[in-house]
């Protein structure tokens, strides 16, 4: 069903390029005077989607003539891309902004920008206006593509610029620059936003409705990434299984995977995140047959209790989740599985929690991301009665981590002596196994071997294991 998203016109994108050029000229003048280019610092909180957004911001900053720096003290522009998914992410971002007040006093000409999910929340602009006077520019997720224009306004005299406007139906902006880190890994956004409204989650409020990029744009970007030497490419969306529902063309996520699998080259495709409500047998059949699609699945179940799942508005039962996993394993016996879990959702009883713990023990995940429930104002769960104390929630959290570590360790141990194909992607901190690599399932391997080269696939034999890492030697 088509939604009311706005596809930003190429004319508007061209305007943004004009603003980038204006700033680039200003920066050239500055560089002449100083003998070095002005610098930009970026920092990202939150998920991979946010990292991908920061790479777009970095692409724009690069186009504007800023050189990258890792030090706020050296920066002319500081951009903090924030997350709102849990209170902890917000307080860390705000803490960092607070710490920048000294820098702003010492160098008032520095431009401090705050963007992303946290600032898109209704109450945030006021809070920033009142309590964080050091912040010069605030822009929400819907205004990201207008960053050059907003920065230009700030640099040419506007006092403080706030733009969290935008229609919740959301925007698709193609053709803006992206600056990736180099190396082997790249993010590729295939869609934005979320329609699921899980009752605990702020994402649909801050990232707008689901909207898919046109398949040809995605294919084109993948071809470009492969040509640039990227080999480990992760397709991103809040719920990739909904891909295509808003497009006129009849295409779903499995069809897209098949198209991308046809792109020539030696690379691996991963994707995240999948929603159990929409993950289909067709998807698992497609994964099994596409040689470039990694046999890896991140399928968050959040809770093993049906009553909690219902209150979370997740749209599936624990039994359905088990069936999905069984089907995926029947098609791909070596599939690597990971999940997200929330402990301490309002009203979660001891019995509910035990159901979650049983599911963890039963499935045997390769990786788990477990979170304590964090109340997000504006979400339905924030209004639900919650009489479990923090201490009880914390104790459950720790018990779950113990179960999780035991099952993950058992999965890791099962790799002992196995031969695995890995992609070597960097240097490790150790000397015995000096390189790092990822298995097709996304597991970290520290490895050794004279013939191993960063950026290339290799076969290694696993010599030992730990909770977070496998250790292998090339064979
Ligand atoms: N509290 C705790 N965890 C949350 N997540 C999302 N919203 C909340 C919240 N309010 C977790 C979910 C999701 C992951 C990205 O973050 O597990 O899958
Ligand atoms: Fe990502 Fe959600 Fe955090 Fe936004 S709020 S950065 S979408 S995890």
Image (cartoon, rainbow, N blue to C red):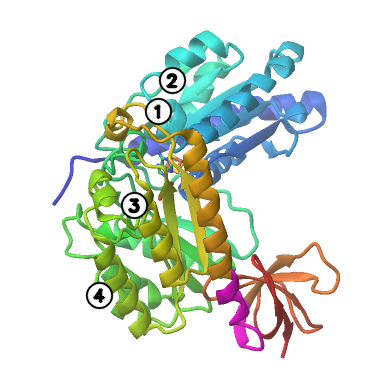
Mark 4 Cβ inside 8 Å of ligand 1: no
Q: Residue at position x 45%, y 57% from top?
A: 188
Q: Which numbered disc, 1 or 4, marks the residue that appears first in the sequence?
A: 1
What's drawn in magenta, residue-wise? Answer: 409-422
303 part of magenta stretch:
no
Q: Residues within 10 Å of mark 1 (few under 14, many from 20)?
A: many
Residue 157 in sight: no
**Above or below, comparing residue 28 to residue 410 in the picture:** above
Residue receiving disc 1: 120
Q: Residue at position x 80%, y 62% from top?
A: 429
Q: Residues within 10 Å of mark 3 (few under 14, many from 20)?
A: many
Residue in front for this viewpoint, 347 or 151: 347
Q: How far apart are the two marked residues, 1 and 4, measured between alpha carbons?
A: 36 Å
**Marks 2 and 1: CB-CB under 8 Å?**
yes
Residue receiving disc 2: 124
Task: Specify the label residue 281 is tagged with.
Answer: 4
Which element type, helix, strand or loop, lies under badge 4? Answer: helix
Q: Which numbered disc, 3 or 1, marks the residue that appears first in the sequence?
A: 1
Q: Position of residue 172 (x, y in %)?
A: 33, 44
Q: Residues within 10 Å of mark 4 (few under 14, many from 20)?
A: some
420 part of magenta stretch:
yes
């Amino acid at each position: 069903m088509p939604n009311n998203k706005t596809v930003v016109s190429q004319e508007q994108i061209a305007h943004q390029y004009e603003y980038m050029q204006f700033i680039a000229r200003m920066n050239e003048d500055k560089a002449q005077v100083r003998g070095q280019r002005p610098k930009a610092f970026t920092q990202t909180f939150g998920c991979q989607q946010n990292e991908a957004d920061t790479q777009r911001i970095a692409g724009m900053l690069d186009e504007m003539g800023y050189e990258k720096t890792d030090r706020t003290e050296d920066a002319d522009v500081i951009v903090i891309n924030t997350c709102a998914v849990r209170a902890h992410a917000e307080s860390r971002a705000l803490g960092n902004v607070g710490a920048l007040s000294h820098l702003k006093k010492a160098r008032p000409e520095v431009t401090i920008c705050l963007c992303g999910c946290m600032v898109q929340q209704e109450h945030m602009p006021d809070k920033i206006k009142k309590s964080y006077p050091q912040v010069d520019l605030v822009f929400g997720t819907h205004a990201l593509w207008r960053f050059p224009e907003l920065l230009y306004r700030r640099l040419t005299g506007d006092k403080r610029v706030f733009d969290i406007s935008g229609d919740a139906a959301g925007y698709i902006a193609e053709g803006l620059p992206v600056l990736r880190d180099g190396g082997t890994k790249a993010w590729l956004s295939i869609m934005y936003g979320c329609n699921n409204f899980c009752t605990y989650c702020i994402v649909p409020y801050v990232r707008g409705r689901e909207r898919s990029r046109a398949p040809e744009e995605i294919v084109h970007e993948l071809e470009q990434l492969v040509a640039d030497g990227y080999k480990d490419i992760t397709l991103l969306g809040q719920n990739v299984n909904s891909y295509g529902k808003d497009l006129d063309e009849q295409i779903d996520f499995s069809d897209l995977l098949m198209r991308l699998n046809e792109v020539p080259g030696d690379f691996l495709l991963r994707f995240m995140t999948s929603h159990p409500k929409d993950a289909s047998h067709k998807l698992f059949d497609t994964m099994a047959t596409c040689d470039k699609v990694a046999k890896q699945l991140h399928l968050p179940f959040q809770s093993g209790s049906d009553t909690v799942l219902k209150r979370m508005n997740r749209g599936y039962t624990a039994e359905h989740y088990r069936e999905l996993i069984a089907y995926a394993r029947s098609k791909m016996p070596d599939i690597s599985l990971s999940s997200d879990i929330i402990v301490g959702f309002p009203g979660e009883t001891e019995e509910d929690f035990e159901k979650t713990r049983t599911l963890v023990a039963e499935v045997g995940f390769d990786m788990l991301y477990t979170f304590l429930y964090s109340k997000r104002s504006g979400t339905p769960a924030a209004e639900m009665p919650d009489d479990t104390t923090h201490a009880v929630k914390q104790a459950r959290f720790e018990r779950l981590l113990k179960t999780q570590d035991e099952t993950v360790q058992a999965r890791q141990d099962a790799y002992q002596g196995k031969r695995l194909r890995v992609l070597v992607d960097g240097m490790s901190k150790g000397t015995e196994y000096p390189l790092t690599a990822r298995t097709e399932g996304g597991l970290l391997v520290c490895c050794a071997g004279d013939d191993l080269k960063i950026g290339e696939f290799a076969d290694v034999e696993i010599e030992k294991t730990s909770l977070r890492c496998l250790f292998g030697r090339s064979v």
